[in-house]
Each structure stands twice: as C-alpha cells, then as structure tokens.
Image: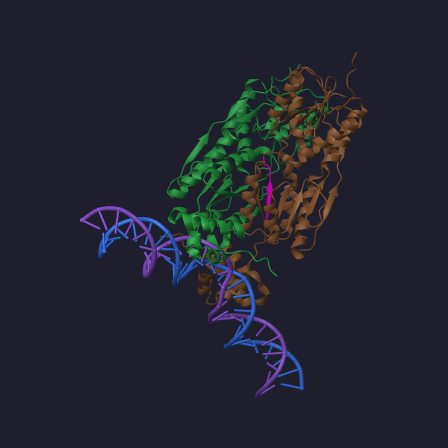
Chain colours: A brown, B green, C blue, D purple
DNA sequence: TCCAAGAATGTAAGCGCTTACATAATTTGA
DNA sequence: TCAAATTATGTAAGCGCTTACATTCTTGGA
C-alpha cells in the first residue's frame, strides 16, 4: 500500500473531464465554464490534490520560485532585508527558497547550482565575490540575479547596495576628527567577503589621509559572534600598544567588545571608544549606545525583489543602485582620554 | 535564440553513449567503467550540464530535499537550531528549503503545501498548532515530519522539544522563592503559539500554587521586537499597581524591558526584576545580565534532523524527545525591594 | 580454445503536468 | 432558422530524467 498521491488524472477521471480541463481550472480558470470549474474544484478539495511541482516545472518551464543565498542566518544582519525581499515577492505570488552558505564560496556555488537546477526563476546573492564560472552559468541560462549588500557599477549585472568603503571611511573620519590616532580593528574574516574588506579599506584610507601609518595597524579577524568580539577585544587591550579606539566590522563584534570592556573594568568611551557597523537592533540595547553605521536593510531587500521582477519581464533590464548609509552617533565613540 | 540549457541527451550525444549511462555516471558511478565515466564527466563539465530537478524528481520520486518552516527568521531564536538542523542534513547530502510563516497559520499551511508539492522528503515544523487537514495531508502522503520547540507526547507523531510550561513554572517558582508576589507578564502573542501559551501557563500555575490571584494578572501580548518590549514595559510600570517583577516570554522582549527601565531611571533588579526566556546571545550583552531559561537550540536542531532521517528509512519510526532546559541565574532577578 | 558468469551499456517505458491544436457545444445575428 | 463566430472541452505530444530489462562485451577457469 503506497502513499497513493492523487494526480491530475485521478481528479479528471473522478470529475469526468479531461486532464487538460483540470489543469486549466487551476492555471486559467476563466477559460473554463463556471459549472465544470466548480465541479472540478470540489473534487480537488475532496481528493486533497496538490500539483506535483516537478511535473509542473518540467512541463511549464517556469517555477515562480526565487532563490536567495545568504552567508549566514545566525544573525540579524540579513534577516530584515530578506524579510522585505520575501514580502515583495509574496505580493506577486512567488515563493522564496533560502539557503545559507556559511561564508564558504564553495558551498555557495553548490547552492547556486542546486537552486538553478531546482528551477529558480531568479536569484538574490550577497556580495560580488564568486567564481567566473558561476557568473557564466547564470548568464548563459539567462537567470536573472541581483547582488545586494555591496555596490559595484557593472555594465550588465544588477546590484543594490551601499558603499562599504565610503561608509567606513566616514566613520573613521569622524573618529579622527575627535582626535583619535591609535586605531585597531576587529573585522569579520576578510577572505571572500568584499563587504568586510571594504570596511577595512575605508578605515585605512581615512588614516592614510591623515598620514597615520597603517603598516602596523592591528587588525584581528574574527568570526561572527559576541564571544569572538569579546575575545578579540581582550587581546587588543592586552597588547603593548593599546589603541584608543577599536572599530568593529559589525555590531555583533562591537557588542562583544563592549561586553568585555565592562568585564575588564574599562569605561566606554572613557578609556576606549568602540564602533560597530550595520545598526541592527542589538545596537540599541548596548550601554553605552553604539556608534555605528545605519544600513538600509529593508530598502535593499525590497528593491532587490523589484529589480528581479523587472528582469523577469525584460531580460535586458539592469540597474546599479547605491543606497545611502548614515552614521549613528552613539555614545560609545568620543574624544580619546588626554595622554599626559 | 533561447537559453539552450544542455540536457542529459546533449551530454549523451556528445559523449557517444546512451542517456542511461550518463545518468548512471551521476547517480551510481561504480556501475560505469572508469573510462566512460571520465569521458562523460569531462563532457558534463564542458557543457556545464546541471540535472533538471523537476525531471529528476518526477522520474525518481524523491528529492533529497527537506523543508523547514519557522515562524520568523528575524531573530536568533530559531537560527541556531536551524543551523544545526541544516548541518546534520548536509552530512547526508540533503538540501534544506526554508520558509517563514510570520506566525500566521494560514501562511504556514500554504508553505507546507508548497514544500510538499515541491517534493520535500521531510519537514521540520515548529510547535503543534495547525489544522487537522494539514496533519492529514502529511500523514496520507507518508511525509515524515518532526515537530520541534515544543514537547507533546503523541503515539505516532515525532517531536523534539522541551516543556515550556515546566520551564516557565520553574523560573516563576524561583521568583516566588525570592519573595515576589506582584507579577506581570509581557508575552508574545498567544494565539496559535503553543510555546508562548505554555510559558504563560507555567507562570500562572506557580502563582496559583502560592494562592496568588491570577485573575487580574497583567499580561501584555507584544510582537517580537525590542521596541515592543520597551513599550509594554513602560505601560506596565505606569499602571497603578506596579509589579515587582516582569516576566517576559522571550529574551528580545526582556531586552526591550531592560532598555526602557534604564530610560525611565529604574534600577534592575533594584526597582524591578525582569526575566527572559530562550537564552539567545543577546541575553549575554544586557546589563545587568538577564535571568532567563536556557534552551538547547542546537541539540534540538540536530536531533530533529536525526529523527527525520530515521523516519526516511523506517516510516514506522517515531520518537517523542523531551530535552532539558535550565535556568540561567542572571542579575536581573533578585529579591523585591522591601515594602515599608 | 570455448563458454558461462559477470560487468558495461543500451532500449524504452513511464513519472505528472502543460499546451498547441482539433473538435464539440453554444451563442449570435440576419 | 441556420451558418458563422465564439466558447468549452478533449487529444496527445512532449518536458528531461530514472530504471527495469535486454543486449553486448569481458573475463577467467576448464
């Protein structure tokens, strides 16, 4: 005795019509007379019929499904944007398939292939760093995709993001204006992560403009967690040349840094200034409030969906959209203590 | 000029073999001679061939794909468990399809149907509350599913979770032992959420055992966000009969409460005790550290995957697993101030 | 050297659906 | 009232893959 899943044919037989009619009832109801439609619908409900997606995709060559691959789901960074992305797609009756790559390029590649072979009609990707072949795959198959969370002008590819370098540069500039000269950085792992990289570059650029040597600028790369942020902070503060400001690549690391500062009995910003990046909700519960960079997560998600839908209609369409960020002037960033 | 996606047949033709051989190269490599296998694999790479998932699912009647539907992705509650779930599945080469329902039962139902028709081999669901038809659908089709984040003994269905009522009861008991009598609750919306409901029930049970009237116990239902937690806290503290302790249904609401307490110039736990639930990372950055209930997220995710995989092999298999929670004795919970 | 057993490959029948096209039923206008 | 136009339904050819079964090619032992 097998599961015995009802098929189109079962419905057709039971309703005394052809499979074509049943199919039309579901996909083009107005091509069917009200009478038969109601009859068929009743049978569908009675039998608990659900179309077989594989067969449907195979026959119709489209799936009304979009895919998104984010580096991680373990934190709030992508969540808000993704939510907006999904909502926008939902309005069009489309479904979202979500996968996370754990910041691993190979995993991401596998998942892109998986989503593609699953028939995703379009893809949302984070950042620009991936192999040439993957781009070729996507472009050869005319699969619309949009890159988010980073901005990079490109003649054919679409993206919606912000300038990580500039945002970070501005925040560093602010710190310099306050009089800081001894910087340190706690960054997310830089490899294969153009966002993290950009943020570090922005800081360096600002420092170099002020002729501050970045040769021995301390940069700790640290995986995404409060605990790691705390450890990195401790390491930096125990080094011989203590910085007066530690700029973190994201709010989570900054939260860890602040936490450890308290634990070490250091005052923020009295003894040490700390900055974050992303402006996730977490930033708002930290004491003192975190100086960070606000990123338009929701807008990014929504616009990404819009671009994708436009590309569906017109494959030629593309758009490079740079969104604005703004500095959140939290209390964790202030003038350095006087050095006597 | 169409996308011109290579098919099995294209590969077969180019390699001078039959489609069956190519198919075997991918699914049962040891049935093919090394020679042909290598030849075929080269062509596959050259053509950039990717199997068509729909066709594959249609022909093979399995997808090696599992689905999970969580109420929300906007926070860390489900993230850690989901990550573990995915990792465990990944070991078996399976893929995870993720959807979020926004705590809406109808949306969840739609998504279950969507995942089912997409051919999910198994499903991870959160909580027990859903329509009878959905359970029937799943059971009629012999689709293995496992319910997580709540424990409920059941003769045929599988679950892995913890006892929300008992955990909450224990935490309330602790508060009672400290001398609290004036309680208030900030809960997640109770409708269609057996976890939230259980947590409230647990508190009530503890109170009733101490003959504290729960008839006019103040309960504010509040959507999941720090901001909402803060607002609810403010409302409670402005009411005529101030509680000495506010127990929150989750850590995020508790974080909002603590934040607002600071803003209102109230000392925690001096003026008011606050408790959370879930023990997400956020809880660790709050000052004072949050008294909360630790939930074994990762174990839950991992075990859920194990159960599902076992059910795949043996449809009769099922398991009701209750995991332990433990109280995190944070500083946000202490004796109430003396009433003079 | 020859033949049976085993390994490698090919053949072809679906899987459940959509849709172009053909046919049947109904409506319309004069 | 009847042919033409319109609407509703049926027929059947795939979509790209897997796999049972049939066929062909290798082996190795007698």
In the picture, measured across the screen, residue D5 lies left or right of residue A53, that is right
Q: B268 and A202: which one is in front?
A: A202
Task: Indicate the position of residue B324 as horizontal and vertical percent values.
Answer: 47, 27
Q: Main secondary structure of the magenta part?
A: strand
* Residue at 59% across, 65% down: A30
Which residue in the rendered view is the most extreme toward the top? A340
**Residue B244 visible at all:** no
Residue at figure coordinates x 77%, y 25% from the top left:
A175
**In the rendering, at what x and y percent does residue A211 appear?**
79, 25
Q: Residue A67 colored magenta?
A: yes
The answer to whether B119 appears left or right of B1 in the picture is: left
Magenta stretch encompasses residue A141: no
Q: Residue A212 at what x, y percent from top left?
A: 77, 24
Stretch in magenta: A66-73
Q: Based on the displayed image, in which of its 4 quarters is residue A220 positioned?
A: top right
User: Can you say whether A95 is above or below B225 in the image?
Assistant: below
């Amino acid at each position: 005795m097998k599961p015995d899943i009802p098929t189109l044919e079962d419905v057709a037989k039971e309703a005394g019509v052809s499979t074509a009619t049943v199919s039309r009832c579901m996909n083009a109801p107005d091509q069917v007379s009200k009478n038969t439609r109601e009859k068929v619908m009743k049978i569908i409900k009675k039998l608990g019929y659900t179309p077989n997606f594989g067969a449907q995709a195979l026959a119709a060559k489209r799936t009304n499904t979009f895919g998104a691959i984010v580096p991680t789901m373990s934190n709030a960074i992508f969540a808000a944007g993704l939510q907006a992305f999904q909502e926008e797609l939902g309005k069009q009756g489309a479904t979202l398939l979500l996968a996370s790559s754990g910041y691993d390029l190979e995993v991401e590649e596998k998942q892109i292939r998986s989503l593609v072979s699953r028939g995703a009609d379009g893809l949302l990707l984070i950042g620009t760093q991936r192999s040439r072949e993957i781009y070729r795959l996507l472009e050869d198959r005319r699969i619309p995709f949009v890159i988010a969370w980073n901005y990079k002008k490109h003649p054919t590819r679409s993206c919606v993001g912000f300038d990580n370098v500039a945002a970070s540069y501005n925040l560093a500039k602010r710190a310099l204006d306050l009089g800081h000269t001894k910087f340190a950085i706690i960054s997310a792992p830089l490899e294969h992560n153009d966002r993290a990289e950009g943020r570090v570059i922005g800081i360096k650029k600002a420092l170099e403009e002020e002729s501050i040597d970045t040769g021995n600028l301390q940069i700790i790369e640290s995986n995404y967690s409060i605990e790691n942020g705390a450890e990195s902070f401790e390491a930096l503060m125990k080094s011989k040349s203590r910085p007066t400001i530690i700029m973190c690549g994201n709010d989570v690391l900054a939260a860890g840094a602040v936490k450890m500062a308290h634990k070490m009995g250091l005052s923020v910003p009295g003894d040490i200034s700390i900055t974050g990046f992303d402006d996730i909700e977490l930033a708002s519960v930290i004491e003192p409030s975190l100086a960070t960079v606000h990123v338009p997560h929701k807008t990014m998600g929504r616009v990404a969906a819009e671009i994708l839908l436009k590309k569906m209609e017109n494959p030629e369409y593309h758009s490079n959209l740079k969104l604005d960020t703004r500095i959140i002037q939290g209390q964790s960033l202030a003038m350095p203590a006087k050095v006597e």
